[in-house]
Image: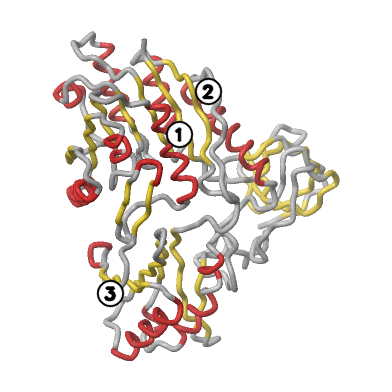
Amino acid sequence: MSALNDEWLEVESLDLDGQGVAHRADGKVVFIEGALPGERVQVNVGRRKNQWEQGQVTAIARESAQRVAPGCPHFGLHREACGGCKMQHLHPAAQVAVKQRVLEDNLWHLGKVKPERLLRPIEGPAWGYRYRARLSVRYVARKDVVLVGFHERKSRYVADMGRCEVLPPAVSALLPRLRALVAGMAERDRLPQIELAMGDAVVALVLRHLAPLPDGDLARLRAFAAEHGVQWWLQPKGPDTVHRLDDDGPELAYDLPEFGVHMPFKPTDFTQVNPHINRVLVQRALTRLDPLPGERVIDWFCGLGNFTLPIARRGATVLGIEGSQALVQRAGENAGRNGLRADFEVRNLFELTADDLQALGPVDRWLVDPPREGAFALAKAAADLVQAGASWAPPKRIVYVSCNPATLARDAGLLVHQAGYRCTQAGVVNMFPHTAHVESMAVFERP
């Protein structure tokens, strides 16, 4: 049960969920939605535990100079607000500073690692950047309306959205049209999701449907595609069942122009949400990795070849390793399409051992780009070999691209304190503006 409290609190920082952090006079921690560092606020407490409380800001006596008007009408603290963004009330430059502090704090407190140099943040457009999104669809029978958008804050309900400022403007403008499209379909109550995947020249929409679509519904989809210049893909069951509604039209792909790389992909493949940031990220990661012609490089968690193919373009001998046979096959096809020579292997990347690393032979550099779980098995295998004094030459440089500062810090601790590396550089990558999501890049070197 929520409760008001007259005590004024000094907000000290933001946590990983974008909540203000304060302490009561008795020392109890209070997490405050909608509050910013430096503000003096009152809070309506919604949850109480022995060591902490959580609630929403109700009054601000001293406002942060970094507080700004949110750019989206669906942002807010009320229950029906969209839950897709949490930090629109904080100036974009301040958001990046907060994320840099989160990265530094995680590296130090979790890994006892302090980078020798902080990298300039990788930033890009704050609005219209999101080229991938999973939009929920809900037919509300009692109101006879269809909702298409993100979920409400802390709710399974779909927010009543007319537009979305983090989607590209042309896609945002489609939201009311998608609502009208689904409302007119016979299977409107069996269509739970529309997934957006944009390439450089194609807008693909993946419709999840729980029942076969009748001819009338398919005709509506085709008419919508013709009118709005999009591609429809259908997903009757799991991700492997995704297929084009019609086979004509251009392929879904993005380019990395600096490396002359063209990357076709399927709409359910993992690609970065923010292509503007991805292009800069690949450039800067390759600059810091600095692979030389003839050197041997491993790209761990290689995916479709986002880093592997640019490394190959630099003339290095590169091996991409991934956990899925389907991904490895697609990465190999992408290498062939670009006229590049790269090898690919399938391995369970979460169960790597020291013997696995030793069997791969000498390697000059690693590019590591794991999911949120991080690369613990890889870092531990390297540390085990070094600690055992094995006749294994560790790579002289590692560039680690992370989407979770906590697992990066854990793995950095192993690399620095047990595998003999120095963390020479680290910095944030603002892949998701207006959210508390922290992506980053760190560089590790051995003498």
The residue at the point 31 percent across, 27 percent down is 366
Q: Residues within 10 Å of mark 2 (few under 14, many from 20)?
A: some
The local secondary structure at tag 2 comes to helix
Residue 131: image x %, image y %?
Answer: 46, 58
Position of 350 compared to 42: left or right? left
From the top left corner, tell me how far across and down residue 166 is, in percent.
56, 59
Q: Mark 3 or 2, which is nearer the eye?
A: 3
Q: Residue furthest left?
A: 359
Front residue (pair 41, 418): 418
Residue 335 in which image quadrant: top left
- Marks 1 and 3 in Cβ contact (< 8 Å): no
Image quarter where the N terminus lies is bottom right
The vertical placement of 94 against 191, above or below, is: above
Disc 2 versus disc 1: nearer the observer: 1
Where is mark 3, residue-wise? 248
Residue 157 visible somewhere in the drawing: no
Q: CA distance from mark 2 to mark 1?
A: 24 Å
User: Of 253 and 6, which appears nearest the observer?
Assistant: 253
Task: Name the residue beneath numbered marker 2.
Answer: 108
Q: CA distance from mark 3 to mark 2?
A: 53 Å
Please name the amino acid that badge 1 sits on.
Arg
Label 1 neighbour load within 10 Å: few <14, some 14-19, many 20+: some
